[in-house]
Amino acid sequence: MNRSRALLVIALLAVAALASLLLALAAGSVALAPGEVWAALLGEGKGGGEGMAVDVVRSLRLPRALSAFACGGLLALAGALMQVLLRNPLADPYVLGISGGAAVGALAAMLLGVSAGFGLEAAAFVGALAAMWLVFGLARGDGSWTQTRLLLTGVIVAAGCGAAVALMLSLAPDQQLRGMLFWLMGDASQAGNPIFVLLILLAGLLVAMFFARELNLLTRGPLLAGTLGANVGRLRLVLYFLASLLTAAAVTTVGSVGFVGLVVPHLVRLALGNDQRLLLPAATLAGGALLTLADTLARSIIAPQQLPVGVLTALIGVPVFLFLLARAPKVEQA
Amino acid sequence: MSGPRTSDQTNEPAGRRRYTPLLATHDLAVSIGGKAVVRGLNLALHPGDRLAILGRNGVGKTTLLHTLAGLRAPDSGEVMLSGQTYAALGPRRAAQLRGLLPQHQGDAFAASVLETVLIGRHPHLSRWDWESTADEHLARAALAAVGLAELAARSIHTLSGGERQRVALATLLVQQPQVYLLDEPLAHLDLNHQIAVLELVSRRVREEAAALVMVLHDINLAAHFSDQALLLHGEGEHELGASAAVLDAARLSRLYGHPLREIRDETRRWFVPEMPK
């Protein structure tokens, strides 16, 4: 793998991502031809029937598609980073309890009567950060910071959050239950302005790429990484905070969408190898495209009814995960 | 501390003392888990020098090697690489000067043999660089040197333990350090490869005017392939000196807690353990 081949792969994936976005703009309860989508994107509404197309594309589908794309990218990137941090190809962005924290924050806010919008997002984000600090503080302990300890702390915090979520669901009045369940399963319909998450995605990818070759070292173990000149302690901190913040941003926007962060980096790794310089941007684009497609499906399969997008990604993700899990021991033994 | 020679004043030719040693320690004290590994270690390795570290399991050989590699802080004293401390050098510059062959290879993710070897070029590339064709030539040459040229495209997960160990050595060779630190380089290797690896590393050290520190378990290979020997007796006690002087049946019997006998012909010596009746 060299730079020009990597750029070619990235370019192809970028085209695929654009195609998924165009499809998301065209498909739905009102199907539009590609030409209509294009006109709606570029042209000023010329009144009449076209005005509705402009409305649907610009103010309904475009923000939602871009949010889904950004969050898919965020989750896939965070997953790839977590897998390097924990040196475990089966780690995912939620393994350290971050989505659990966000869920507790969001559901608590809903219970207190906060409706969708900024208040809910703020509560979810605060919950994610709280879980992150809790895991980090506890795992740090005496200063030594092993993968096992981090993983165990994360799993326990996630389990605690799960219990708190179940408690809140059982206390919640009936009319709030549906919104809570949708949030828990992942739902892009409430996503607001996508600019913020897109910027976080871009910034996160740039930071990750800055450290990409050092991440390659870290996959070979902290000892070898240290010998070859990586500052392992600092690198792990950067990884931890970056992956956590990316996850928090995604969960805050679309709820806990499962399996994108696990399956996408894994599939990209199978197809393209484990060079982080290629894997990170490729997983970001593929994750974005996947969630965009899944969200499009979620709102068009039984339109005008909407499915939570997390259910679709899980339906795709579970068999793929089981397949990978069944394969994993063979790779280890070989 | 006991032993015939414990500092660099007696075990090196007088003419070389003017040069800065590639690797030196000043009054180094290292411990692990409250147990002393060495106290007051004064070491000086010049170009071409080969030091073997011998001692029982758990005495702290790896801990000492990691301290020499700057990956672990000593209790007191200093480790100097070409006259500078690790703190002054920084991790990247240090990685250009010294390389470590770790005891275990961590392969959490699949990668090809060639990719694994190319990792060793990391300290020589700037942040946004990709490995060049020159780097790839180096990697293929290193693979050829360890006899694995035809395995370049294979996945490391398909290699045997001995092959994986030689891939790790090739990774160290492309790093092109001036100080080679080898932690049990002969692990998993069969006899012919043990000799071949020690010959390869010795030749490298001679040709590139580098220095070599290796943790070994085979006394006879250590005696043949080292110029200096460091015996770790436990409780911080050590003996350092020319291999020809320090390695004798009495010291080695005490070191390993098992009687050893020396056998010699006109030019060579061998140490063999006494067998139980």
Image (tube, coloured by chain):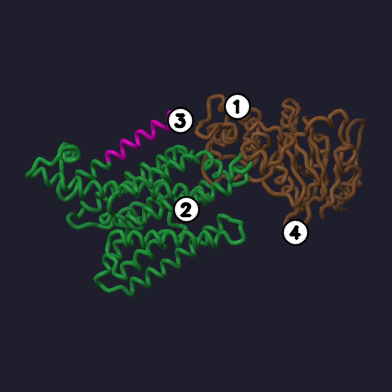
Evaluate whether residue B166 shows in this view. no
Residue B221 horizontal/vertical position (percent): 80, 38
Under mark 3, the amino acid is Arg
Q: How crowded is mark 4: few (under 14 residues within 10 Å), some or many (20 or more)?
A: few
Determine which quarter of the picture holds residue A50: top left
- Label 2 packing within 10 angstroms: few (<14), some (14-19), many (20+): many
Name the residue rendered at 75%, 28% in the picture. B209
Residue A2 magenta-drawn? Answer: yes
Mark 2 residue type:
Ala
For residue A91, which numbered disc appears in the image? 2
Q: Name the residue under label 1.
A: B138
Chain in brown, by letter, is B
Disc 2 versus disc 3: nearer the observer: 3
User: Residue B262 lies in what quarter of the image?
Assistant: top right
Residue A43 locus on image (x, y percent)? 16, 37
Stretch in magenta: A1-19
Question: Do marks 1 and 3 share a chain?
Answer: no
> What is the CA distance from the residue labelled 4 to the residue labelled 3?
49 Å
Give the residue pinned by disc 4: B34
Q: Which of marks 2 and 3 is nearer the N terminus?
A: 3
| Residues at marks 2 and 3, CA–CA distance in whole angstroms | 28 Å
User: Which chain appears green?
Assistant: A
Residue depicted at x 47% and y 38%: A277
Which residue has dot 3 on it? A3
Secondary-structure class at tag 4: loop
Kindly identify the amino acid type of the residue bearing the numbered disc 4.
Answer: Gly
Query: Hey, which quadrant is residue B17 in on the image?
Result: top right
